[in-house]
Amino acid sequence: LQKYSEGLEVIVEERTKDLVTAMKEIEKSNKLKTEIIANMNHEIRTPLSFIKSSAALIKVLIRNESQNPELLETMESLDSGVNRLNRTMEMFADLSSLKSGNYVINAEPISLNGIIEHNYLTYQKFIAEQNKNINITFNSTIEDAYTNADETTIHRSIEYILNNSVKFTQTGYVKIDLFEKDNKIVVNIEDTGIGMSEEYQKIIFEPFSQEDMSATRGYEGIGLSLSLVKEFAKLNNFYLSFQSEKNVGTTFSLEFDKIAVE
């Protein structure tokens, strides 16, 4: 029995060493991935910023000096592509900071009315430019919807969810509602888009997850936005939930603590 016990201890010790070694390798790999993302973001953001400012200048010159619709359409496509790439790099930067534990928020009294209004007007313009057959509305029953949170991450949370709603909706509507319930401020973003299957709903907050991962998928994106919103919810202590039905639509709800501001 003593020999059996000693042999078992040796096996446990060896397995423990193997487990520690494996954990160190995983940690090393994760650190490397974080560093790669951070360096990639730094190297791409600078030339991207130059391209964006140059494209904006060229668009102004073309509008003033040319009536060539094909040229104008080309510049609109360039601008759209730059904005898409910029949003992607922004997501990678946020993911890198979150994974390394270096993401810092600045919690302060902020107006949800202003943040939602800005996003609403942005996507109202986008829908018109893209000639999408959907109607976007914003209805608020709260005049001063203040909460204590980080403005940047709240803005991105609303933007990412709204972007998905617009992207995955071909006909019908995208509806934003801001109201008070049980002393909470609630933001509902509802759409009549493609919805999500029950299986996919289980993993929608995992990084790089998409329901259609095929090379021929009909929608752009890298599957990071909702995982970031989930992390932003944790950082800001707001409650995030959703309801979805395949081929019917999706509703996301964000619930914030209400504060009084003089």
Image (cartoon, rainbow, N blue to C red):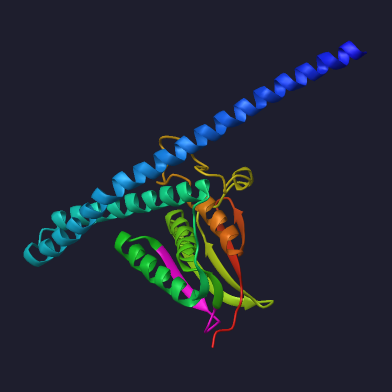
The answer, for residue 194, to whether it is visible in the render is no
Q: Residue furthest top?
A: 3
> Position of 75 compared to 160: left or right?
left
Q: Nearer the viewer, residue 143 or 35?
A: 35
> Position of 89 compared to 208: left or right?
left
Residue 100 part of the magenta segment: no
Rendered residue at 49%/61% (across/down): 157
Rendered residue at 10%/63% (across/down): 61
**Residue 132, percent across and down?**
36, 60
Q: Residue furthest left?
A: 65
Q: Nearer the viewer, residue 149 or 171?
A: 149
Tally of numbered discs: 0
Which quadrant holds the C terminus?
A: bottom right
| Above or below for 170 versus 206 | below
Q: Which residues are magenta?
A: 134-145
**Residue 178, percent across and down?**
55, 75
**Residue 43, percent across and down?**
30, 44
The answer, for residue 165, to whether it is visible in the render is yes
Q: Residue furthest bottom?
A: 262
Rendered residue at 57%/60% (across/down): 235
> Position of 22 compared to 57: left or right?
right
Which quadrant holds the N terminus?
A: top right
> Position of 117 compared to 25: left or right?
left
**Residue 95, percent across and down?**
47, 48
Rendered residue at 57%/47% (across/down): 204
